[in-house]
Amino acid sequence: MPQPLAILGGKPIRTKPFTSWPIFGKAEEKALVRTLHSGKWGRLQGEEVARFEQRFAAEHGCKHGIAVVNGTVSLRIGLMAAGICAEDEVIVPPYTFLSTASAVIEANAIPVFADIHRGTFNLDPQAVEAAITPRTKAIIPVHFAGQPADMDAIMAIAKKRNLFVMEDAAHAHGASLGSRPAGSIGHLGSFSFQSSKNMTAGEGGIITTNDDALAESCRSIQSCGRVAGGLWYEHHVISGNYRLGEFQGALLGCQLDRLAAQTERRDRNGQYLAARLSQLPGLHPQARPADCTRHSYHLFMMRLVESEFGVSRGAVLNALRAEGIPCSAGYGYSLPQQPLFKNKAFGPYLPKARAKLNYAKVRCANSDLLCSAECIWLEQSLFLGPRKDMEDIVRAFERIHQNRDALNAVFRN
C-alpha cells in the first residue's frame, strides 16, 4: 500500500531544506574587504573587474569579456554593437525571460517570435527559417535552463542569410556544446549574474566574443562612447555608463573559482534525476542532445503530460511542495501574450512600426502548451547537494503517481 501524500495528511518526504543560495565564504569576505580598503571602487580605477573579465572570457573560450551592470543591458549593447537599426527584425524564442525580447525593443528593433522545440525547450531551427523575412538581421538563441541550443543549425542558417547571432547564455555559465563553451559559438554571448543565476554578485552581466571589432564597439557603448586612445571627454556613439563596479567584480572572481565544481555537480545530479524521472509515465525531462557535453542546470526542466501521468500539473505542484520539494510552473504564458507585447507598451521605441504589429495574434504552439499545462521547474540550488537530495525528489514524484487517484479525488471535487 502506498504511503499517503503529505497534502492528504501523510508525513512529508523532506523537512530538511535543500542547499541555500548564494554560496559564499571567507574568500568572498576577504575580496570585498580588500576592495573596500583599496579605495578603488569603480571599474576605471580598480583591477577586480578587469581581472574577472579576462578570466571569465578565457574559461568560456573567448578573447574578450566586457562586464556590464546586468544581463539585459548586455543584450542591448550587443545588438547596438552589431549595427542593428530601427525596425530591423530580430528572431527570439517565446519561451524565455522578458529581457531577451525587451532588449530588442530597446535597440529600436522588432522582436519576431519563433517557436521552441517541445522536447529541448530551445529555439527550433525550422521555426527560425520560417520566421526570416527581408528585414531579419539577427537571431538570439537562448540556452534555456543551461542547455545549449542547436547552435550548429542556427549558425548555418545565419551564415547562409548573413545574420548576426547573439547567444543568450544567462542560464548557461560553464555549459558546453562539444568542445565549445556557451558564449563562444555565436558572434557574441551574453551572461547574467542576477541573484538566482549560477554565478551571482546580486546583479551584473558580461558580453563575450572572439571578434576584436565587436569587442571594441561593446566597450565603447559600455563606457560612454569613449574609444581607446581618445580623450576622456570624447564620445563617439550613443551610449551610457554601463560598467560593472569593483565590489561585484571581486565577488564574481570568487564565484568563478567555484563554478567548475558546482557545474559538474549540477550536471551529474541533473542527469541522474532525468534518468530516474523518465521511468515514470508522463514525465519527460528536457531532451538532451548528444553533443551537449555539459548542461549547467540553472533549471531542471520537465514536461508533465496529464493524460499519461494521471494527475494535472497544478495538483502535482501542490503535492510536491507539501512533500518539501520546491518547484514551480515557470512562465504563465509565452512572451507574445505578455501585456507589454499585447498592448505594444514600448515607450518611445518603434513609433512607426506599432500600427502593423499585432502580437495578440501570435501563437507559438509548443511554448503555449508548456506554459499553460505541462512545464515544471526545479531550481539550480537543489542540484548542489548530495545524491540523497535527488532520491527525495524521485520519491516525491513516485508517491504522487502512486496516490494519483486519491489526489484526483481532492482536486477534481
Image (cartoon, rainbow, N blue to C red):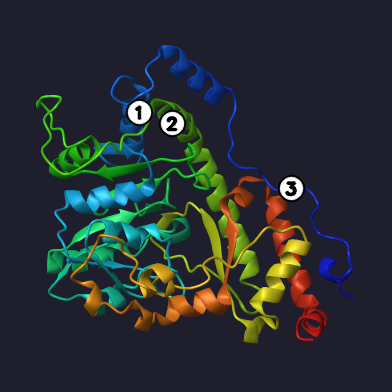
Residue type at numbered disc 3: Pro
Residue type at numbered disc 1: Val
Residue type at numbered disc 2: Gln
x, y percentage for residue 328?
62, 64
Q: Which image quarter is the N terminus in?
A: bottom right
Looking at the picture, does residue 5 appear above or below residue 34? below
Decide: marks 2, 1 in contact (CB < 8 A)? yes
Confirm whether residue 267 shows in the render.
yes
Front-lying residue, 207 or 100? 100
Label located before the other in sequence (1 or 3): 3
Q: CA distance from mark 2 to mark 1?
A: 8 Å
x, y percentage for residue 228?
13, 29
- Determine whether the residue tagged by mark 3 lies in a helix, strand or loop: loop
Q: Which residue is mark 3?
A: 17
The crowd level at tag 1 (other Cα within 10 Å; few <14, some 14-19, many 20+) is many
Q: Which residue is mark 2?
A: 248
Q: Which residue is mark 1?
A: 49
The crowd level at tag 3 (other Cα within 10 Å; few <14, some 14-19, many 20+) is few
Label located before the other in sequence (2 or 1): 1
